[in-house]
Amino acid sequence: MITFWRILKSGCKNLFRNAWLSIAATAIMVITLVIVAFFSFSALFLQNQLQAIRNKIDLTIFIKDEATAEQTQQLSSSIKALDKVQGVTYVSKLDALERLRTSSKDGEKLAKTAIDIGNPLPASLEVKTTSLEKLSDLDAEIRKVPQANLIASSSLEDSDVRKKVVERIVQISKAVSQVGTIISVAFLVVSLLIIFNTIRMAIFTRREEIDIMKLVGATKWFIRGPFLVEGAVYGIIGAIIAIAITFPLINFAKPLFVSYFNAAEVLTFVSDRASLVVLSMFGLGIAIGVSSSYLAISRHLKL
Amino acid sequence: MYPNKTVALSGVSLHIQPKEFVTVVGASGAGKSTLIRLLIKEEDPTSGKIIVGSIDYDTITKANIPHLRRRIGVVFQDFKLLPNLTVYENVAFALEVSGVRTSEIKRAVPKILQLVGLAEKASNYPGEISGGEKQRVAIARALVRNPKILIADEPTGNLDPKNSWDIIELLLKINKFGTTVLLTTHNKEIVNTLKRRVITVARGRIVKDEKVGRYIL
């Protein structure tokens, strides 16, 4: 135990002997962690959005105004009975109005106008399917159910647009994860090398001390320990700074995301994973620091 | 044996009694240092056996080398003190490395500094003290763990005659307390005055081993 404290103390002392090198090592650690965090975060988020979009309603059936509640109920259950249908949600005219009100900045104004002209928004049934592939087939089937005369129109055209959006996001998320992986790995290697060399310099300036330690009977771990601690400290400091940079960065980038995605989703996505981000940054930082320092010292430590 | 087939030592067979004071003499390159390197297992013999105390060096694993070195005190010609540590810290360092408790260190170090006569220089740095004093620090560091054997590799090599004698007298005192001392030296005067066992090494062989030896090459 006392040995552990001595190792820890000596490792922290090392940091200040070569202040500039320590700063360089910490800086590259910060850059690496921020880049890795940014890309893995973006990839995760896009994946998450993809899932969310896929889960959205696939086909909307608009119902004629004259349909009674009972008739609508029958239509709904007929559609539900179809093969590829996962679920059906009923949206009344009032619901539709409410949605319009909250949908955008001008929603309030639009809703007011809608009320003034007697709410022209139709009630609808939102149909979720098991696959997005053959929506036109499903549409045709729905139009054959007994209560089909109640259907005013459907959102088939709209679905095609959404399919394209999904494809686009798949493309982007693939590109992001590919580019992200390459850049992340490159920076990981660079930071590994820089810390490796920092520790090597530290070993070089202290080789006399290391020789003396060997002669007075220090164990390998006693000699190695301080350097490993030094590497770990680079990781810890790097992670702290990287976290301090990443979170404001995400906040800053939020409006950018918000214009494409739902604001609430972005917010919950970030806050849900905050502790994961913090933990993995520390983990990765310490792993990089310790492993490169272990590599550096192993080559110099022959008793 | 070294890479380019230089044989540093060959056919060396010697036995040192516990509590003995042995001087090894020989010209530079004769093999004195190799003998010491073998004893602290910085090097392994290509053939032959080394036994110190009851420890057979062949049975020592790599992980145990540090523990072996903790039981043998070594003093070098160039002192090998850490310049950025005080006299006290240099001696304490040897104990810290072995995982000795701080309270124990605080007790042992002043005692040993007293023994080598450096109590009042405890807070000085190696750069601020004389060569003879530096060598005393090195001896204190070697002794602080109570080794059974003290190896002094040309401890007087960098010292003037007066300081050299002080060091030799200190070694004799230590030997009197019951520590086996193995001294290597170039100093003819010292060897001739000591009147102790002298082993003469030349070209990697023991050429003479006398109970009361003189320095003859």
Image (cartoon, coloured by chain):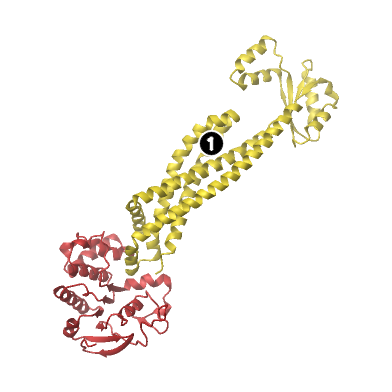
Q: Which residue is at a point 51% across and 39% down the rendered structure image?
A: A274
Q: Colour of chain B?
A: red
Q: Which residue is at a point 60% across and 30% down the rendered structure image?
A: A260
Q: Does residue A272 sit above or below A189 in this rendering?
A: above
Q: Residues within 10 Å of mark 1 (few under 14, many from 20)?
A: some
Identify the residue at the far top of this view. A116
Q: Is residue B198 visible?
A: yes
Instruction: Classify residue A159 by image quadrant.
Output: top right
- Report whether B99 appears left or right of A135: left
Q: For the N terminus of chain B, which image quadrant? A: bottom left
Instruction: Classify residue B7 by image quadrant.
Output: bottom left
Disc 1: which residue: A270
Instruction: Classify residue A293 by image quadrant.
Output: bottom left
Q: Position of residue B87 (x, y in %)?
A: 22, 62
Q: Which residue is at a point 61% across and 21% down the rendered structure image?
A: A102
Q: Is residue A88 visible?
A: no
- Chain that is coloured yellow in the picture: A
**Label 1 amino acid?**
Val
For the residue pair A60 and B100, the one nearer the viewer reads as A60
For the residue pair A49 and A102, the one nearer the viewer reads as A49
Identify the residue at the far left of this view. B162
Q: Position of residue A43 (x, y in %)?
A: 59, 41
- Report whether B6 appears left or right of A43: left
Q: Does residue A132 sit above or below A280 in this rendering?
A: above
Chain of the residue where label 1 is placed in the rendered structure: A
Q: Which residue is at a point 29% across and 66% down the rendered structure image?
A: B94
Q: Position of residue A44 (x, y in %)?
A: 59, 41
